[in-house]
Image (cartoon, rainbow, N blue to C red):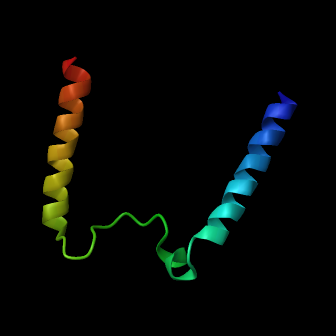
Amino acid sequence: CLVYITFQGAGAIAGAGLLKIIVPYSYVGTLGVIAPGEGVSSLEALGAEIIINFLLLFVTVGM
């Protein structure tokens, strides 16, 4: 159990370090922000979200 926790921590630190190396500095402030892309209004994003969630639930619950 201790070995598992140690390796999980080491993997998290390695992943964070790799992400810091790979991601350009211009993305650092907005990394992980959930917002519509350029040219997409909030209403369009909401509509797409509703349709995609309906399809996902239709497939998973309907089967």
Q: Nearer the viewer, residue 22 or 52?
A: 22
User: Is 11 located above or below residue 2 in the figure?
Assistant: below
| Residue at position x 62%, y 64% in the image | 19
In which image quadrant can residue 8 be found?
Answer: top right
Q: Indicate left or right for 36 with 33 as reference.
A: left
The residue positioned 17% from the left and 36% from the top of the image is: 55
Quadrant location, the C terminus: top left
Q: Quadrant of residue 59?
A: top left
Whether residue 42 sits left or right of residue 11 in the image: it is left
Query: In the figure, residue 46 lies in which quadrant?
Result: bottom left
The location of residue 61, given as percent across then percent down, is 23, 22
Residue drawn at x 47%, y 74% is 30
- In percent of width and height, residue 14 lies at 74, 55
**Which residue ends up furthest to the right in the rendered image?**
2
Q: Nearer the viewer, residue 27 or 34?
A: 27
Tell me residue 11's x, y (percent). 73, 47
Residue found at the very far top of the displayed protein? 63
Quadrant that contains the N terminus: top right
